[in-house]
């Protein structure tokens, strides 16, 4: 069987090995995990660009199939497909029903620590956005 091994003496901690082989664990088994974020967008169309929000703070990195992560994403996508309006983005759907309800219908554990709306960054004005309105 072919496999890849990192030469620890020559490692520069650049992470390129991980981009070539995502199933390669980069940390210890207890600390190596995945964060799921949802609701962000770069587009300026219809509504302002938005930062993604952390919806699951930690999922174990269960390579190579990532069962817990894929099951969680599947629950989110199925709830979104069931409840969203036509052409409504996931983040817009979550904001329409409320983020607390989003966690409920997606069967995700919710704490107030998960959602960061980056209000501290908008210290001059609440209207800091790249969206143009005429």
Image (cartoon, rainbow, N blue to C red):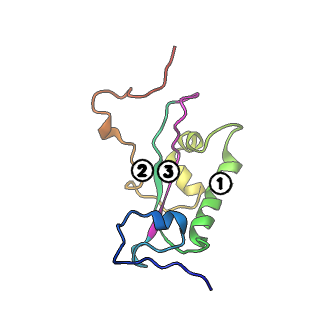
Res 29 → quadrant? bottom left
Dot in front, 2 or 3: 2
The answer, for residue 58, to whether it is visible in the render is no
Instruction: Identify which residue is drawn at 54% across, 69% down.
Output: 21
CB under 8 Å between callouts 2 and 1?
Answer: no
Task: Tell me: residue 119, above or below residue 116.
Answer: above
**According to the image, label 3 marks what residue?**
100
Tell me: 48 left or right of 76: left
Residue 94: % across, % down: 56, 45
**According to the image, label 1 marks what residue?**
77
The answer, for residue 38, to whether it is visible in the render is yes
- How crowded pointer 1 is (Cα within 10 Å; few <14, some 14-19, many 20+) is rated as some
Judging from the image, what secondary structure is the residue with disc 3 in? helix
Res 115 label: 2
Q: Main secondary structure of the magenta part?
A: loop
Instruction: Identify which residue is drawn at 45% across, 27% down.
Output: 130
Furthest toward the bottom, the residue is: 1
Instruction: Identify which residue is drawn at 40% across, 78% down.
Output: 7
Residue 49: % across, % down: 49, 34
Tell me: 123 left or right of 32: left
Residue 87: % across, % down: 69, 37
Give the CA distance from mark 2 to mark 3: 10 Å
Magenta residues, start to end: 33-47
């Amino acid at each position: 069987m072919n496999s890849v091994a990192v030469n620890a003496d020559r490692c520069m901690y650049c992470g390129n090995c991980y981009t070539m082989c995502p199933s390669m664990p980069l940390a210890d088994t207890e600390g190596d995990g995945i964060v799921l974020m949802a609701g962000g967008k770069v587009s300026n169309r219809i509504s302002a660009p938005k930062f993604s929000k952390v919806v699951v703070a930690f999922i174990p990195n269960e390579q190579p199939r990532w069962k817990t992560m894929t099951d969680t994403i599947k629950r989110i996508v199925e709830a979104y497909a069931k409840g969203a309006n036509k052409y409504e983005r996931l983040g817009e759907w979550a904001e329409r029903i409320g983020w607390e309800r989003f966690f409920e219908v997606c069967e995700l554990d919710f704490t107030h620590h998960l959602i960061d709306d980056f209000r501290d960054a908008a210290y001059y004005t609440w209207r800091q956005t790249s969206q143009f309105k005429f």
